[in-house]
Image: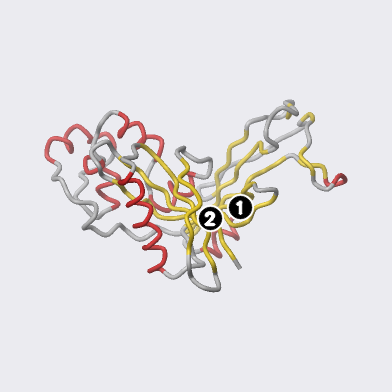
């Protein structure tokens, strides 16, 4: 009756911190995440809001810059949550956030690395319901006229819908599903508008014994959680 919940953050060098929705990474084995999804559905909306604001306060306290994930342990029985860690990386499941928040995290990470304030990034402005003036091509014009706003005083947009991610790993079912290595005879996957995947090997390649057993990641998107699961 416990869950592993997390909040995606993006922070600039000017002290602005955005909480870009949440993810649930509770399905794990051998301390490795197997299924990730977002946004959180197992906790009440007010609790999710608390998780987001707690994560923002933490990032501000340490003057964090860049992308980060704040992870929590959540009790389904009591509704209490406990801090686990701040993960100072762009995690492999970040496309879940890309789909539910409509924000390109790698591109935004480059922007804040260049010193651009969050309130000047078009997708962040749209995320908070501010005039955004178009897509990324309009950055120059937007930066010149964009009005500064306080991220502590604005409400973010609701998640666009739901996204489920599954990790594809190389394991031996005859040996307790232990990680294994070997040649990949054929790998054939075709993405669709609502299902996307990437792999670190291709047909004729091999998975060697010196790496993690994960070699692929599949992401499925839907207007609801049940549709996202069906698409997966």
Q: Is residue 191 above or below residue 158?
A: above
Q: Name the quadrant of the C terminus.
A: bottom right
Residue drawn at x 71%, y 29% as measured from the top left? 203
- The residue furthest bottom is 77
Circle number at residue 198 = none
Query: Quick one: 37 or 220, which is closer to the camera?
Result: 37
Mark 1 and mark 2 in contact? Answer it, CB < 8 Å. yes
Query: Quick one: 40 or 83, which is closer to the camera?
Result: 83
Badge 2 crowding class, 10 Å Cα cut-off, few under 14, some 14 to 19, many 20 or more, is many
Q: Quadrant of residue 196?
A: top right
Residue 107 point in image, percent of width and height:
37, 34
- The residue furthest right is 174
Q: Quadrant of residue 116?
A: top left
Circle number at residue 35 = 1
Query: Quick one: 108 or 63, which is closer to the camera?
Result: 63
> Position of 48 compared to 215: left or right?
left
Residue drawn at x 31%, y 46% as measured from the top left? 61
- Total marks shown come to 2
Residue drawn at x 18%, y 38% as measured from the top left? 142
> Position of 211 compared to 17: left or right?
right
Q: Is residue 79 above or below residue 132?
A: below
Q: Is residue 55 above or below residue 2?
A: above
Residue 184 point in image, percent of width and height:
76, 31
Q: Which residue was labeled with disc 2?
A: 37
Residue drawn at x 46%, y 38% as measured from the top left? 90
Element under disc 1: strand
Find the distance from the CA under tag 1 to the CA under tag 2: 7 Å
Badge 1 crowding class, 10 Å Cα cut-off, few under 14, some 14 to 19, many 20 or more, is many
Q: Name the quadrant of the N terminus.
A: bottom right
Element under disc 2: strand
Residue 213 point in image, percent of width and height:
70, 37
């Amino acid at each position: 009756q416990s869950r592993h919940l997390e909040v995606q953050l993006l922070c600039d060098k000017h002290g602005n911190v955005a909480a870009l929705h949440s993810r649930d990474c509770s399905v794990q084995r051998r301390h490795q995440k197997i299924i990730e999804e977002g946004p959180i559905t197992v906790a009440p909306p007010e609790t999710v809001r608390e998780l987001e604001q707690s994560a923002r306060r933490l990032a501000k306290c340490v003057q964090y810059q860049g992308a980060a994930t704040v992870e929590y342990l959540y009790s389904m029985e009591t509704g209490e949550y406990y801090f686990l860690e701040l993960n100072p990386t762009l995690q492999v499941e970040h496309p879940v956030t890309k789909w539910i928040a409509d924000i390109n995290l790698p591109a935004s990470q480059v922007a804040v690395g260049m010193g651009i304030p969050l309130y000047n990034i078009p997708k962040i402005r749209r995320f908070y319901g501010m005039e955004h003036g178009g897509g990324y091509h309009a950055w120059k014009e937007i930066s010149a006229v964009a009005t500064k706003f306080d991220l502590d005083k604005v409400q973010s947009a609701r998640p666009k819908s739901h996204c489920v991610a599954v990790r594809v790993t190389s394991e031996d079912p005859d040996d307790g599903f232990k990680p294994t290595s070997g040649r990949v005879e054929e790998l054939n996957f075709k993405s669709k508008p609502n299902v996307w995947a990437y792999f670190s090997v291709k047909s004729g390649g091999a998975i060697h014994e010196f790496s993690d057993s994960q070699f692929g990641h599949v992401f499925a998107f839907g207007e609801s959680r049940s549709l996202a699961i069906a698409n997966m």
